Image (spheres, grey):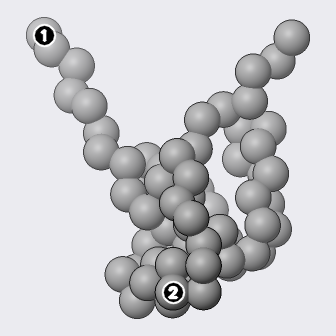
Amino acid sequence: MAKTKTTAVPARVLLDLQIDGVTYRVDQVIEVEPSIIDAYLHQLDDHPDAVAHALSAGAAPVVHAPAIKE
């Protein structure tokens, strides 16, 4: 059976936080899997208006990737 790929969605960071060892700051826009948004419900906002606000303030979208541990 083929694996279904989940599409990443943009979200505005509402509070400084770490996801998978990567630090994000308030008003960054990150592209993450919907399950991550669900896990950080009060720290990420995927509403289009929230994302548009951060982008209009100069945020550049970043694709989330877990930190590589050596």
- Measuring 43% from the left and 84% from the top, which residue is drawn there? 52
The amino acid type found where label 2 is placed reads Ser
Q: Eyeballing the image, is 61 above or below 53?
A: above
Percent x, y for residue 69?
A: 82, 18
Q: Quadrant of residue 4?
A: top left
Name the spot of residue 26 as percent of width and height, x first: 75, 75
> Could you tell whether 69 is left or right of 12 in the image?
right
Q: With respect to residue 68, does 42 lie above or below?
A: below
Mark on residue 56?
Answer: 2
Identify the secondary structure beneath mark 1: loop
- Residue 29 in view: yes
Image point (51%, 86%), residue name: 56
State the residue at coordinates (76%, 43%).
Answer: 22
**Dot 1: few (<14), some (14–19), or many (≥20) neighbours within 10 Å?**
few
Question: Which mark, by number, is residue 36?
Answer: none
Q: Which residue is mark 1?
A: 1
- Residue type, label 1: Met
Tell me: 34 left or right of 28. Answer: left
Q: Is residue 28 left or right of residue 9?
A: right
Q: Quadrant of the N terminus?
A: top left
Location of the C terminus (image quadrant)? top right
Q: Is residue 35 visible?
A: no
Pointer 1 with pointer 2, Cβ within 8 A: no
Closer to viewer: mark 1 or mark 2: 2
Q: Secondary structure at mark 2?
A: helix
Is the residue 20 above or below the residue 54 in the image? above
- Residue closer to the observer: 58 or 27: 58
